[in-house]
Amino acid sequence: MGYILVTFILVTSISIILLIGYPAFTQELDRSHLQNMEEGFYIMASEGNKVAMLESTFQSAELKLHGGSLGIREDGYINIFCYSDHEGNNLMGNNSTTLSAMEYSINDQGVAYLLGGVCRKNGDYTYAVKNPEIYNSSNMFVVPVIKFYNSNVAISGNGLTRISISTPYYSKLSQYVSYPMPSYYDNVKRIDVHLSGDYTNYLSRFFQDELYFNELSNTGGVVVLSNNYTSGIKFCWMPSYVTITAK
């Protein structure tokens, strides 16, 4: 009877430890892996931005997958309006593009590279790992629009993945791809930004915290932000393509 009781207590204790400890252990593994993935995406974005800005024709990086999936998709958009007055009555022009994101996702978490920046996703919440490559000085506002061209990435499972990032302008693709022309507006007094998609929170906070935009509205999944420039600035919308492969 005593042996049976001891065995019962031992089995029950082990079961409780496994029941409580194993989920905590797997959660810690996921947290550690996503931390490593953040660092990998940061390096990849830094190298990819060099290619997008034509500072280099080719760069590479490595990502280690422990489950989950890696892919590229388009999600949401960014639309920027430039005005010659502070009230937003005289439109000078607008530029819009869908957002291309390279994403790693596992369960409801993930990491993404878009607009030259990196963000971490946890459920519906996103936050910055690396800010987008958007610049705002006292007299100029520059938006480098980094898009993925002829890139088909779809990998899942475990193991080391090598990411290659190249420019289509100096390759066999160059006969099919022309340099996208930048858009310039001088003496811009007001800029409005419209954002939508899964990464709206990340981009909206960047515009507000780093570029001092104010939120005008947030309805129907679209956030509208605005900023005035007393003396007027030059606005530049600068598209650029990179080609990404993974194996």
Image (tube, rainbow, N blue to C red):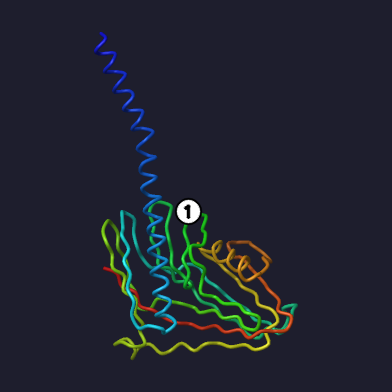
Where residue 192 appears, as percent x and y from the top left, is: 65, 75
Where residue 51 appears, as percent x and y from the top left, is: 39, 80
Q: Quadrant of residue 45?
A: bottom left
Where residue 201 appears, as percent x and y from the top left, is: 56, 61
Above or below residue 208? Residue 20 is: above
Q: Residue at x 34, y 59 (%)?
A: 69
Residue type (three-letter) at the residue carrying disc 1:
Asn
Q: Quadrant of residue 58?
A: bottom left
- 155 or 48: which is nearer to us? 48
Q: Residue at x 41, y 84 (%)?
A: 55
Residue at the limit of the structure toward the top, as seen here: 1
- 229 or 175: which is nearer to us? 229
Q: Residue at x 70, y 79 (%)?
A: 229
Q: Which residue is mark 1?
A: 122
Q: Secondary structure at mark 1?
A: strand
Count of marks, rendered view: 1
Q: Quadrant of residue 207?
A: bottom right
Q: Quadrant of the C terminus?
A: bottom left
Q: Badge 1: few (under 14), some or many (20 or more) residues near its Cα, within 10 Å? A: some
Q: Is 9 left, or right, of 232 in this rendering?
A: left
Above or below residue 237? Residue 31 is: above
Q: Quadrant of the N terminus?
A: top left
Q: Is 71 left, or right, of 195 in this rendering?
A: left
Where residue 180 appears, as percent x and y from the top left, is: 46, 87
